[in-house]
């Protein structure tokens, strides 16, 4: 649900200061334009980072959005793999609805943290290479979770291809480059601060990411563009 506001807004001191600064003729419009785009990026990033301290993992709006969408496609007898599970926040949430979930990550410290924070009869955490793990155990999962993973991968098409034999469905969540026209401004003017995270090698637009799925014959069962991310349920041909 959105919000209702009074037509006349209260004055905000910081807004007034920046608005007056933007009208100063000391520098060019382009310089100010780029500066404010950079500041918008910086403040958004800092606010998002600080938000992690204000919410419990299960109540953070980002996690809530993921769960509201993903939970529609999970059933109680599902066997799920959370690929790149980090410290296991999402893995633990999913565990409440499925028969079993395994979380795997190549970051040793993250897996140790996950094991300390979460546990249960239907949840386990594995440190190691996911593809080697799957080839070793020879299990086909009902769903593989790839939440905020593909944007870190040099060749996402090849990466997805390697995991298709091991699952019936994928859940893919990536940042939405088209979440705001500010990113178009940044691209046109050449801003360096245009990525969502320092480790990202791709920032996908909607047509681009769906074209990858199409090439791999992954059927888009459902999709959602919300909270600055793209969410997809994909069915493999297995």
Image (spheres, grey):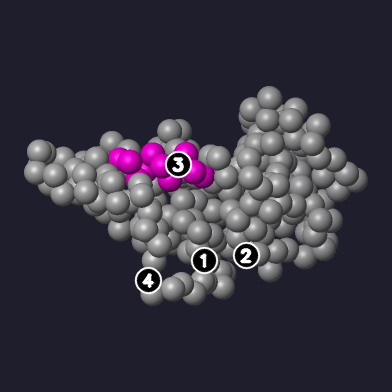
SS state under label 3: helix
Residue for badge 1: 224
Percent across and percent down for residue 174 are: 49, 51
Residue mark closest to the camera, 3 vs 4: 4
Q: Is residue 64 left or right of residue 207?
A: right
SS state under label 4: loop
**Residue 81 can be seen, yes or no:** no
Residue for badge 4: 8
Whole-angstrom CA distance, mark 3 to mark 4, is 29 Å
State which tag comes first along the sequence, 1 or 2.
Answer: 2
Residue for badge 3: 45
Which image quadrant: the C terminus? bottom right
SS state under label 2: helix
State which tag comes first along the sequence, 3 or 4.
Answer: 4
Residue for badge 2: 69
Percent across and percent down for residue 211 are: 39, 59
Q: Foreground: 97 or 51? A: 51
Residue at 57 percent of width and 45 percent of height:
51
State which tag comes first along the sequence, 2 or 3.
Answer: 3
Q: Is residue 156 magenta?
A: no
Is residue 230 positioned above or below 22 on the image?
A: below
Disc 1 residue crowd, few under 14, some 14–19, many 20+, Cα 10 Å: some
State which tag comes first along the sequence, 3 or 1.
Answer: 3
Disc 4 residue crowd, few under 14, some 14–19, many 20+, Cα 10 Å: few
Whole-angstrom CA distance, mark 2 to mark 4, is 36 Å
């Amino acid at each position: 649900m959105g919000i209702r506001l009074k037509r006349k807004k209260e004055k905000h001191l910081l807004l007034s200061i920046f608005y007056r600064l933007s009208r100063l003729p000391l520098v060019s419009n382009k310089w100010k334009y780029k500066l404010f785009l950079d500041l918008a990026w910086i403040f958004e990033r800092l606010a998002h980072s600080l938000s992690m301290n204000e919410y419990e993992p299960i109540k953070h709006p980002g996690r809530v959005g993921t769960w509201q969408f993903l939970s529609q496609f999970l059933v109680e007898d599902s066997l799920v793999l959370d690929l790149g599970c980090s410290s296991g926040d999402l893995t633990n949430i999913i565990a409440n609805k499925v028969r079993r979930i395994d979380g795997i990550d190549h970051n040793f410290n993250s897996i140790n943290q996950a094991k300390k924070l979460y546990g249960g009869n239907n949840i386990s955490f594995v440190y190691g290479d996911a593809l080697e793990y799957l080839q070793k155990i020879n299990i086909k999962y009902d769903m593989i979770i790839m939440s905020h993973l593909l944007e870190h991968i040099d060749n996402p098409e090849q990466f997805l291809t390697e995991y298709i034999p091991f699952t019936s469905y994928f859940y893919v969540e990536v940042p939405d480059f088209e979440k705001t026209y500010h990113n178009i401004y940044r691209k046109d003017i050449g801003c360096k601060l245009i990525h969502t995270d320092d480790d990202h090698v791709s920032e996908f637009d909607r047509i681009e990411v769906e074209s990858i799925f199409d090439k791999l014959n992954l059927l888009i069962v459902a999709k959602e563009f919300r909270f600055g991310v793209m969410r997809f349920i994909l069915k493999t041909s297995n």
